[in-house]
Image (cartoon, grey):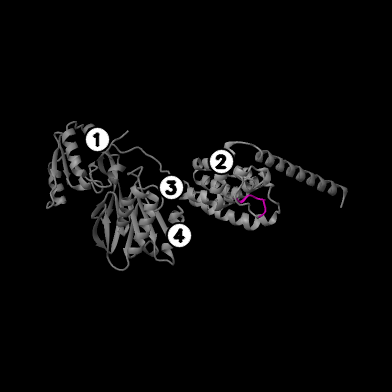
């Protein structure tokens, strides 16, 4: 060994001994520090983090009630935590042999109930805490910041209760953060979709402050009584409007045609499948909400001020119109099940339950489109692009983009149901090879095993052996609030 190598080795050993001495001194300073916070809070926090119970509970809460990014963060955090725990306990602790601190220096009230027998370096609790916090932050930075502070407190609790030296904690933080960062490179975070905006096509229309020339066709019983409420509001706010109340034995199509002959403005009380002036009298009112008429007051205001703009239509086989959505298979049942439960248990759990229930009870439909032939139980087609991506489309920021939004879940492959449910629970369905999404001006499919019913705007219609959908750009003028 040369003198230079010898001196370098001596220098490294001196630095190591110095760091070890500093580590022990910091531990002793924390251990001997009095304080109610250390004595009361630290033992509780360290026990909560045992076996990652704290992080799993937070992940469950985020999955149940969080935003899409929070749910994805929870899935990413749990996956990262699991890998980190395995690496830390089965690999890292066997590479570095370091005894636990002398916990006799720690006040009895603060000591951990059970002193671990494994090596002290690195801290497994700290590694798991950092892995979860960083994993969540990659999908949701605001949540990640709060969790990082909590992870720091967990690390402090391991020193305060005598389980680890500060150096063990920092080593654990480094391992957890590194594994989370590596996981992010292998499975990049989902970037929320943002759609470009454009100026609406406005139509010059006279103001109607009292509802002159308006004929409203409405079913009083629609939307569990919403129709009757709409009638009362319209009578009060548009006194000159004519109101046609549908009875049980009336044919809606005939009533609408008769009303259109004498109306300057045809108004319909409903949520989906309605045109021109839309009052939110249905159950969910998706179309009304997306054109900005989520309340009677907003529709009345648009009629009074003559505020009209054009939205797209979708033409089915050149003979039927779709203004909101179309579907085959069990998609309408899936939506009804999810929306019935989401106000009780939250949208994520409701969506997971609805997906499981739908996939178990519904028979797949075999279709052919482009160069693909596949089985699907859930097929959704929307007028204009929906957000977010994935199989829970919720809203449209535009209804005049000239595109059709198509989403298909393939259920004919091996273990497809399990794979779909796992991807949905982790917030990664849009990355699954069983999920197909496209935004196109035209789309057509063929039902391989014979005609299949196609639901339009929430109502099951005719059966088709071949269905062709074409976007009609800005074909429908609608009363809607405009900025």
**Which residue is painted at 63% across and 36% down in the image?**
34
Helix, strand or loop under label 3: helix
Q: Secondary structure at mark 1?
A: helix
Indicate whether residue 199 is drawn in magenta: no
Distance from disc 4 to disc 1, alpha carbons, whole Å, reads 45 Å
Q: Which residues are magenta?
A: 118-124
**Between marks 1 and 2, how big is the CA–CA gap?**
55 Å
Locate residue 9, reporting x and y percent: 81, 48
Question: Alpha-carbon neighbours of circle 1 within 10 Å: few (<14), some, or many (≥20)?
Answer: some
Please tell me the numbered disc located at residue 444.
none
Number of the front mark, 1 or 2: 2
Which quarter of the rendered picture does the C terminus lie within? top left
Q: Main secondary structure of the magenta part?
A: loop
* Apparent side of residue 399 relative to residue 79 in the rendered image (left or right): left
Image coordinates of residue 214 in percent, x first then y, are 16, 38
Q: Nearer the viewer, mark 2 or mark 3?
A: 2
First in sequence: mark 4 vs mark 1: 1
Q: Residues within 10 Å of mark 4 (few under 14, many from 20)?
A: few
Residue depicted at 37% across the width and 39% down the height: 198
Question: Quick check: can you spot residue 381?
Answer: yes
Residue 67 image position (x, y, % from top left): 43, 45
The residue that label 3 is drawn on is 68
Q: CA distance from mark 2 to mark 3?
A: 36 Å
Q: Which residue is mark 4?
A: 433
Q: Are marks 2 and 3 in contact (CB under 8 Å)?
A: no
* Residue 283 percent across, percent down from the top left: 25, 47
C-alpha span from label 3 to label 4 = 20 Å
Q: Are marks 2 and 4 in contact (CB under 8 Å)?
A: no
């Amino acid at each position: 060994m040369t003198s230079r190598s010898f001196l370098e080795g001596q220098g490294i050993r001196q630095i190591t001994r110095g760091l070890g001495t500093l580590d022990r001194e910091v531990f002793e300073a924390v251990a001997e520090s009095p304080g109610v916070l250390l004595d009361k809070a630290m033992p509780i926090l360290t026990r909560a983090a045992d076996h990652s119970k704290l992080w799993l509970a937070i992940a469950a809460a985020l999955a149940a009630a969080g935003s899409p990014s929070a749910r994805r963060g929870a899935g990413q955090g749990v996956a990262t935590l699991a890998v980190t725990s395995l690496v830390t306990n089965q690999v890292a602790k066997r590479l570095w042999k370091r005894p636990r601190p002398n916990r006799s220096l720690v006040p009895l009230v603060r000591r951990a109930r059970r002193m671990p027998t494994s090596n002290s370096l690195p801290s497994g609790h700290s590694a798991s805490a950092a892995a979860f916090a960083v994993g969540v932050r990659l999908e949701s930075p605001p949540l990640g910041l709060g969790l990082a502070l909590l992870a720091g407190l967990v690390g402090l609790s391991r020193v305060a209760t005598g389980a680890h030296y500060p150096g063990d904690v920092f080593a654990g933080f480094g391992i957890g953060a590194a594994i989370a960062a590596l996981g992010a490179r292998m499975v990049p975070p989902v970037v929320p979709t943002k759609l470009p905006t454009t100026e609406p096509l406005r139509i010059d229309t006279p103001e109607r402050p009292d509802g002159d020339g308006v004929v409203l066709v409405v079913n009083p019983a629609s939307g569990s009584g919403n129709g009757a409420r709409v009638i009362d509001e319209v009578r009060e706010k548009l006194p000159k409007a004519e109101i046609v109340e549908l009875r049980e034995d009336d044919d809606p199509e005939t009533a609408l045609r008769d009303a259109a002959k004498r109306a300057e403005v045809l108004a319909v009380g409903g949520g989906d499948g309605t045109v021109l002036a839309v009052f939110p009298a249905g159950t969910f009112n998706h179309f009304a909400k997306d054109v900005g008429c989520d309340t009677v007051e907003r529709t009345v205001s648009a009629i009074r001020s003559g505020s009209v703009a054009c939205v797209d239509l979708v033409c089915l086989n050149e003979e039927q119109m779709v203004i909101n959505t179309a579907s085959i298979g069990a998609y309408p049942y899936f939506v009804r099940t999810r929306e019935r439960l989401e106000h009780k248990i939250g949208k994520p759990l409701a969506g997971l339950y609805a997906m499981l229930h739908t996939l178990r009870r519904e028979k797949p439909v075999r279709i052919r489109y482009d160069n693909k032939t596949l089985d699907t139980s859930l097929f959704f087609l929307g007028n204009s692009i929906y957000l977010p991506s994935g199989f829970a489309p919720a809203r449209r920021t535009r209804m005049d983009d000239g595109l059709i939004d198509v989403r298909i879940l393939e259920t004919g492959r091996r273990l497809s149901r399990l794979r779909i449910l796992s991807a949905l629970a982790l917030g990664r369905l849009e990355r699954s090879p069983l999920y197909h999404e496209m935004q196109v001006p035209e789309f057509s499919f063929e039902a391989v095993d014979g005609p299949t019913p196609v639901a339009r705007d929430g109502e099951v219609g005719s059966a088709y052996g071949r269905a062709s959908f074409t976007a009609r750009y800005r074909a429908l003028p609608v009363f809607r609030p405009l900025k």
